[in-house]
Image: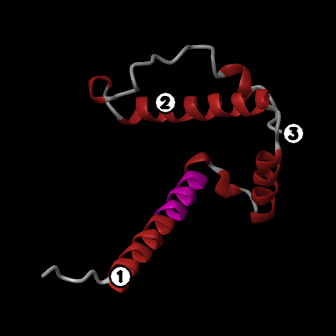
Amino acid sequence: MRKPRDFDAELKALEDKAKDLKNRKVQKLGELVILTGADALTADELAGALIVLAETKDTGKREAWAKRGAAFFQSRARRSAPAPDRDNGGTQPQSGSAQPASGGTGEA
């Protein structure tokens, strides 16, 4: 005879896993705020900027922001990992690709 499934235990385990994932996401977002220096902003300024970012539909601006963010993480990886140990997905950073995005004000 097969052992009956304990649905309550399985549900509890899934809820615990979801809670852990949410906590990890919140922690990573907090680390990102600190890493980028955005922790110097007030909570109102940061919330306002994030709202503008989330509401922006202009794909050009969003692509520029994405390039700038990728360049930020690549530059951090270059500083923290020796070149042979780094895996950048087989792509090489282009020297001028992220520079134009940094000249903008970041406002919508």
Identify whether 23 is placed above or below 32. below
Q: Is mark 1 on a helix, strand or loop?
A: helix
Label placed on residue 51: none
List the single residue furthest toward the right: 108
Q: In this view, does 30 lie to the left or right of 81?
A: right
Residue at 75% from the left image edge and 64% from the top image edge: 43
Residue type, numbered disc 3: Ala
Residue closer to the observer: 108 or 16: 16
Foreground of the two, 70 or 20: 20
Q: Name the residue under label 1.
A: 7
Quarter of the image for residue 99 reads top right
Q: Which amino acid does label 2 sit on?
A: Gln
Q: How crowded is mark 1: few (under 14 residues within 10 Å), some or many (20 or more)?
A: few
Observer-side mark, 2 or 3, equals: 3
Q: Which residue is drawn at 46% across and 63% down?
A: 24
- Using the image, determine if residue 9 lies above or below residue 19: below
- On screen, residue 97 versus residue 57, left or right, reads left
Magenta-highlighted residues? 24-34
Q: Which quadrant, please, contains the C terminus?
A: top right
Q: Mark 2 points at which residue?
A: 74
